[in-house]
Amino acid sequence: MKKFISSAIFTSVIGISSIFVSSVAKADFNVSQYAQSQADGCTAFPDRIRFAYDFTGACNSHDWCYSYSEVSRKNCDDSLLREAEASCNGKRVCLKAAQVLYKGVRRFGQPYFLRARQASGRPQNDSR
């Protein structure tokens, strides 16, 4: 039964990752709307899935890092991965979801980073 549940959760994570990738790839970025927003969690990736993971805190910290810190985008993204993995308590499905989330922000996060920095007036320091 435990193996079945893990398998079902893993399948959900993979399905969600494909939704994440397609929704981010097709996103219509609105600078003024983004500038008015506050931390919104994981944006196109679910913040949490019951019994699998909860990345809300890590994603909110990541939003803050993009908007208000003066470190590079890579540092913000690496910090997101560390925080997300730390919240997993060793659960494999959670660790896999953290990797999917990280790969998504590395691949599609550039426009979000640039708009967040522009809106906050912070230096871009984008060393990808």
Image (cartoon, rainbow, N blue to C red):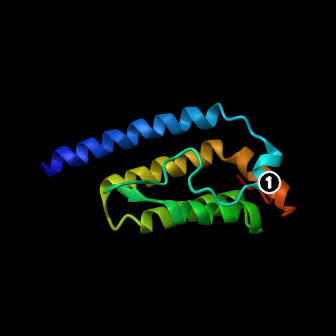
Whole-percent x, y for residue 43 in the image = 59, 49
Q: Image quarter for residue 40?
A: bottom right
Whole-percent x, y for residue 79 in the image = 58, 65
Instruction: Examine the rendering and report whether any part of residue 82 can be seen.
Output: no
| Residue 106 to residue 25: above or below | below
- Between 33 and 60, which is closer to the camera in this rendering? 33
- Between 117 and 75, which is closer to the camera in this rendering? 117
Whole-percent x, y for residue 58 in the image = 53, 64
Q: Image quarter for residue 53?
A: bottom left
Secondary structure of residue under mark 1 = helix
Residue at 31 percent of width and 44 percent of height = 10
Which residue was labeled with disc 1?
35
Outermost residue, right side:
121
Q: Which amino acid type is marked by label 1?
A: Ala
**Classed neighbour count for the residue bearing mark 1: other residues with Cα under 10 Å, few (<14), some (14–19), many (≥20):** some
- Between 100 and 24, which is closer to the camera in this rendering? 24
- Between 32 and 98, which is closer to the camera in this rendering? 32
How many marks overall?
Answer: 1
Q: Image quarter for residue 12?
A: top left
Instruction: Examine the rendering and report whether any part of residue 85 can be seen.
Output: yes
- Left or right of 85? Residue 79 is right
Residue at 61 percent of width and 38 percent of height = 24
Whole-percent x, y for residue 52 in the image = 34, 55
